[in-house]
Image: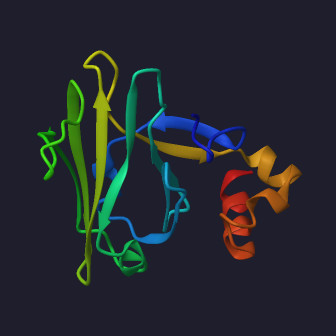
Amino acid sequence: MTSKLHANMGTARAAHFSQLKGKTLLDFWNDDDELIFKTNDLKFYTMYHDQDCCESVYIEDIDGDLEDLIGDEILLAEETSEEAEDNEHGESYGESGTWTFYKLSTIKASTTIRWLGQSNGYYSESVSFYEVELDVECVLEEPERWDDLLTEEERGLFLLGNT
C-alpha cells in the first residue's frame, strides 16, 4: 500500500512523530489503514504501513478522540514501542509482534493511537510517518481534488505562499 495522500499529490519526506509537537491540529482523516493529519502551517502528515508478504501492521485501537485535539497546540507528541506478548486469551501474535503507541496531548485532551505489527520475524512491523509537501501544480490543475483536504481560504494561502 502507498499512502493515499502522497500518491500523485505531493512529495513525502520521512519525519519524526515528535515534529507534531508545537503545531495545532486543524483536521485529520482516519482511513483505517492510514491516518492523515493537517496542521496549522498547512502541512500534512501521514502514518501508515506498506504491507508486505508475511506481516500485518494495523491500527488496533485509538484511546481517546482525535477530534478533541483539534484547535489546540500539541504539547506532547511521543512514540514508544514494546514487544507484543500473547493476548488476553493466551493466543500468540505470531513469531514476532510489536505494539507501537503514538501519544498526542493538548491542554484539553490526550489520545493514544495503538498500532499492532505481527510478522514471522523477518518483515517490518513498524509504522511509517511522513511529512507530505503538496504539489502546487496539482493544486492549480485539479482544485477539486483538494476539496476534502483544503478549504478555499487555505488553498489560497497555500498557493500564495508557494507560487
Q: Is residue 147 left or right of residue 20?
A: right
Extreme residue toward the top, this view: 122
Question: Compared with residue 50, is residue 24 higher up or lower down, i.e. above or below?
Answer: below
Q: Residue at x 46, y 41 (%)?
A: 130
Where is residue 125 drawn, in percent x and y?
A: 31, 31
Where is residue 117 drawn, in percent x and y?
A: 30, 37
Quarter location, residue 76: bottom left
Q: Is residue 103 left or right of residue 129?
A: left
Question: Compared with residue 81, is residue 1 higher up or lower down, i.e. above or below?
Answer: above
Where is residue 11 drawn, in percent x and y?
A: 61, 37
Count the labels in the image.
0
Q: Quadrant of the N terminus?
A: top right
Q: Residue at x 49, y 68 (%)?
A: 40
Q: Is residue 81 left or right of residue 118?
A: left
Where is residue 160 drawn, in percent x and y?
A: 72, 61
Extreme residue toward the bottom, this view: 108
Q: What colour scheme was applied to this rendering of the protein?
A: rainbow
Instruction: Decide which of 150, 51 is in the foreground and name it.
Output: 51
Q: Residue at x 37, y 65 (%)?
A: 23
Quarter location, residue 78: bottom left
Instruction: Decide which of 162, 155 is in the foreground and name it.
Output: 155
Quarter location, residue 147: bottom right
Question: Compared with residue 94, is residue 109 higher up or lower down, i.e. above or below?
Answer: below
Q: Is residue 19 left or right of residue 95?
A: right
Instruction: Decide which of 132, 3 is in the foreground and name it.
Output: 3
